[in-house]
Image (tube, grey):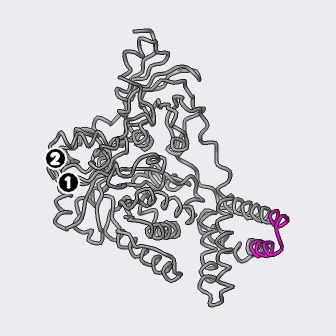
Amino acid sequence: MSGALRLQGQGNGCGCVIGPVYLAAEPLSPHGGQASPSQEFESLDRAIAGSVAALEALMVATDQASADILEFQIEMLRDPVIGEMAAEQIGKGQNAAFAWVTALEEYIAGFEQSEDEDIRARAVDMIDIRDRVLRALEGAPADADGFPAGSIFVGRDMAPSLFLAHDWMQGGGIALEAGSTASHVALLARARGVPMAVGIGRFAVDAATLVLVDGDSGLVMVHPSDADIAALAKPALVIAEDAPALGPADATALSVGGVELLVNISGIADIRDRDPGTCDGIGLLRTEFLISSVADLANEEKQFQLYSEIVRWAAGRPVTIRLFDLGGDKPLGGFSAEERNPFLGLRGIRLLLSMPVMLKIQARALLRAGALGTIKVLLPMVTVASEVEETRRLFEEEAAGLAQRHVAISMPAIGMMVEVPAAAIMLETFERADFFSLGTNDLAHYLSATARDNPRVADLHRQAAPALLRLIAQAVAVAREMGKPIGICGDMAGQPECLALLIASGIRQISVAPSQLAAVKTALAQAGVDG
């Protein structure tokens, strides 16, 4: 072949792509720092002042009746009592967004519960200013989609938020110096069919240089020749949405031999333009990837709208929505960033229960969205039964509060991720969980004591597969004795070579990336699954 620079890494199995390099200016990471209390005070002051200024400008261009409404909102924004309540929360360690929401909770509830109809009507104004300040705190969206469509992103690593913000409809690929095929951005790339190679090491390349990424083999070629391209390209280069989709003939035949086939998604973009009839529902919605800022975590209305859109797409099929799985390698807003070992620290349901305001906001949004379809709620990183019991109690309290306000809701089934070995071994103690979902990515991570995003121990991680399969079989047997459904939503479910073993262990519900549905269906048929 030519003298092109050839770099070998690990691929994500999503075919080949050719394009010009977009060179990351610096290593990108999802980690962010935690602002100091003084910075949080300043952020909230700016957001309130900006909201007041916007309302004052609106008053100038409106009629007197509307101006009176806006004037009330301005008065409430300037109310020193609300400001002091928010400041007190910031002083206790809350960020500006949650401090603001907490300060307004009692005000809104007081208006809504009043016997005076005029006063009750003011609750809408309070909700309006709550959300206006939250939007101001979020600020102008960062230029996350700052590289051209169709290009090859080259950098040390890539933040999931950057991946999600980019338009992959026009192709493109990813070549990372570090990273892992088990990282979250790799998971997202597989879901969208974006060719990716990781662990290729440091190399020098200029922006706009032509690069080929072979996501199947993990090979990256800089300055590929026509002969290189012809030799490496499969029947066609696979780019983003060009990944094979299921046709109409497949639409009613996804459940093979009694095995439910569902999809894992991180947002509406993963299922846009897909017929919901091509799957049995959504087995995992990763809500943390729907959120772009800490302010969104405190915005009940925005969350409700996002969940509602996905529930409507499912058209009556079940939608399993995982609560925010923050911490570890997803410290949005600085959560767990300062911990010595964030993977073993305050993450998942531990973090949510330590911040009940955040959990209550998400619970209310989910309860409301549940009235529109079949929602199931999944708890991440569960270790002990009391975490399920405490979360269920919180959902029941929020449901009672919404019902008292005559808000349409539906109490969802509440299940748990089985991804902590201690929980998997003691599964029979989780009687209050309605269902179980095996998260094989983290379960393998903790079971083998190997970081899934560290290529230096990737081989050891793989060699621990027999131990993982044994634990899965034990968990499935216990769940059956308990009479509770158990499925799998981790990466192992999308690996055709593992499917026969999973089915043999008793798994009858599998959730994979949308782009993997056809391959999994074929593998199940070849395995002669008879249910």
Contact (CB < 8 A) between labels 1 and 2? yes
Q: Is residue 426 above or below residue 180?
A: below
Per the rendering, the mark at residue 349 is none
Residue extending farthest front? 249
Q: CA distance from mark 1 to mark 2?
A: 8 Å
Question: Label 2 is placed on what type of residue?
Answer: Val
The quadrant holding residue 301 is bottom right
Q: SS for tag 1? A: loop
Residue extending farthest bottom? 115
Q: Residue at x 14, y 49 (%)?
A: 530
Residue 524 showing in the rendered view: yes
Q: Residue at x 17, y 56 (%)?
A: 474
Q: SS for tag 2? A: loop
Q: Which residue is mark 1?
A: 258
The quadrant holding residue 381 is bottom left
- Magenta span includes 63: yes
Q: Residue 473, percent across and down?
A: 18, 53
Q: Going from the N terminus, do you reach mark 1 or mark 2 first?
A: 1
Q: Would residue 261 be found to the left or right of residue 104 on screen?
A: left
Q: Residue 284, percent across and down?
A: 38, 54
Q: Is residue 434 above or below residue 227?
A: below
Magenta stretch?
56-73
Residue extending farthest right? 60
Q: Quadrant of the N terminus?
A: top left
Q: Residue 270, percent across and down?
A: 45, 46
Dot 1, crowdedness within 10 Å: few (<14), some or many (≥20)? few
Q: Which residue is mark 2?
A: 529
Question: Label 1 is placed on what type of residue?
Answer: Gly
Q: Is residue 141 above or below residue 380?
A: above
